[in-house]
Image (cartoon, helix red, strand yellow):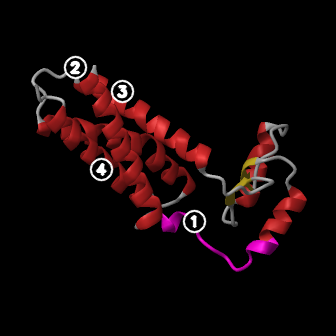
Amino acid sequence: MKKQLVSIIVGGLILFIWQFVSWALIPIHKSEYGYTPNQDKIMEALSQNLTEEGTYMLPGINPSLSREAVEAEMAAHEGKPWASVTYHKSMSNAMGMNMFRGFAIDLVAIYLLIWLLMKIPNLTLGTSVQASVAIGVIAYLTIPYLNSIWFETNSLEHLIDAVVQWGLVGAWLGWYLPRN
């Protein structure tokens, strides 16, 4: 039990530290958050026109429209600009709870990975790295990559994260778990 607890904590720290490095130090995700000098005008327009927090697809389709009206609306927007906007009424720079929640889910992810790895008889470093990277790539393919297809965005940064962070975790667990 002590070995698994140490594995979870160190593995969680590896994930958490890589995520910080990836988003804040390198940062490989900078292309996901562009800047426009018109941001104040855009925020003013959003604040005047959106009453609820949430993510909006613009142009959106009124859910009360008939199927025919939806098809006509979609045809009218073909070839025109579109946007996906996440709107919040108030910005907060308090990161404490977000960081705590992020670390907590990293610990849960490592716990689940360890549970799977412990099912492998005669676990080796190579098998641990391969299995861990495979799980990271599965996660990448089913969320960031799939979203990049539908929202026409770049997801290379997320693929790098998947391979690097899960490869590092797999190396740690492959070295530590089989030891007596």
Q: As shown in the figure, which amino acid type bears the numbered disc 1?
A: Tyr
Residue 123, picture quadrant: top left
Mark 3 crowd level (few <14, some 14–19, many ≥20, 10 Å Cα): few
Mark 1 crowd level (few <14, some 14–19, many ≥20, 10 Å Cα): few
Task: Identify residue for label 1.
Answer: 33
Q: Do the residues labelled 4 and 2 touch (CB within 8 Å)?
A: no
Q: Are marks 4 and 1 in contact (CB under 8 Å)?
A: no
Say whether residue 19 is visible: yes
The boundaries of the magenta stretch are: 29-41
| Residue drawn 56% across the image and 54% down it | 151
Q: Which is nearer the eye, 10 or 20?
A: 10
Quadrant, the N terminus: top left
Q: As shown in the figure, which amino acid type bears the numbered disc 2?
A: Lys
Estimate the spatial distance between the alpha carbons at disc 4 and disc 1, rounded to whole Å: 22 Å
Task: Identify residue for label 2.
Answer: 119
Q: Are marks 4 and 3 in contact (CB under 8 Å)?
A: no
- Up-down: is 35 above or below 96? below
SS for callout 4: helix
Mark 2 crowd level (few <14, some 14–19, many ≥20, 10 Å Cα): few
Q: Residue 36 in the image: x percent, y percent?
A: 67, 76
Task: Identify residue for label 3.
Answer: 112
Q: Residue 172 in the image: x percent, y percent?
A: 22, 41
SS for callout 1: loop
Estimate the spatial distance between the alpha carbons at disc 4 and disc 3, rounded to whole Å: 18 Å
